[in-house]
Image (tube, rainbow, N blue to C red):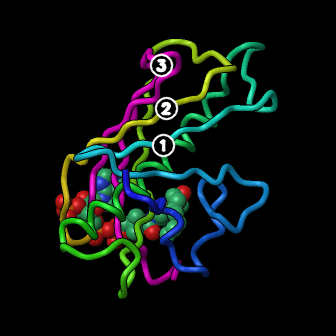
């Protein structure tokens, strides 16, 4: 694993995202890292993330996939250019498409583990496939198409 989380390399003014912004105290503050050619993140759901008692809310799972996907996209773009994470000019990505499949109920209790595979890297677009596991069982899979931050959001 790298020592710095992808999201901790985001510029100050782009670190307020509900899913991963380090400056959003009410947010999830997801942290993603490299693990070889794959990307990983962990998240501990809390009781307020309940769907049916005992099981995790699907919207939370989708938002974890969203932010692990966009974070992984940014890291993959830096890696493809042979640049250090967070170096200038910044390579920031937003979600163009978010696809989630819920394969089985996700138990509320264990830490959720996300694992991402970089499927495609282009100059403006990165595609990331992900799994979300609890107790070493894949509960959901996801796919994010991430596109470079548009001028309208900068
Ligand atoms: C930066 C730190 C913040 C962290 C972000 C956290 C994640 C988020 O929640 S971001 C918020 C949600 N996302 C948004 O609000 C984005 C709103 N959408 C947009 O601004 C635009 O539609 C945007 C930028 C995604 C795409 O812009 P657009 O001009 O349509 O892109 P365009 O140049 O046509 O397409 C680029 C590539 O992406 C692909 N693409 C674009 N949209 C989609 C889509 N919906 N589905 C699949 N592929 C798509 C295109 O096919 C194209 O691929 P290729 O190069 O292979 O032909």
Label 3 or label 2, whichever lies nearer to me, is 2
Indicate whether residue 29 is drawn in magenta. Answer: no
Q: Earlier in the sequence, mark 1 or mark 2?
A: 1
Q: Which mark is residue 137?
A: none
The answer to whether the residue labelled 1 contacts the one labelled 2, judged by CB atoms less than 8 Å apart, is: yes
**Mark 1 lies on residue:** 41
| 3 or 1: tag closer to the N-terminus | 1
Task: Read off the residue under disc 3.
Answer: 139
Magenta extent:
126-154
Q: Secondary structure at mark 2?
A: strand
Pointers 3 and 2 in contact (CB under 8 A)? no
- Residue 82 percent across, percent down from the top left: 19, 73
- 92 vs 19, left or right, is left
The 10 Å Cα crowd at callout 1, few under 14, some 14 to 19, many 20 or more, is many
Helix, strand or loop for disc 1:
strand
The residue beneath circle 2 is 113
Q: List the single residue furthest toward the bottom.
A: 88
Depicted 150 relative to depicted 36: above or below: below
């Amino acid at each position: 694993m790298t020592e710095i989380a992808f999201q901790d390399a985001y510029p100050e003014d782009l670190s307020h995202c509900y899913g991963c912004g380090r400056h959003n105290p009410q947010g999830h503050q997801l942290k993603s890292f490299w693990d070889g050619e794959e990307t990983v993140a962990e998240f501990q759901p809390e009781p307020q993330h309940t769907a049916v008692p005992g099981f995790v809310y699907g919207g939370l799972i989708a938002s974890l996939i969203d932010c692990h996907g966009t974070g992984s996209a940014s890291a993959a773009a830096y890696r493809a250019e042979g640049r250090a994470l967070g170096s200038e000019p910044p390579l920031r990505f937003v979600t163009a498409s978010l696809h989630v499949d819920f394969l089985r109920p996700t138990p509320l209790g264990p830490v959720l583990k996300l694992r991402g595979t970089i499927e495609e890297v282009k100059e403006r677009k990165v595609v990331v496939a992900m799994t979300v596991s609890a107790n070493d069982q894949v509960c959901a899979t996801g796919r994010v198409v991430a596109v470079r931050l548009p001028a309208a959001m900068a």
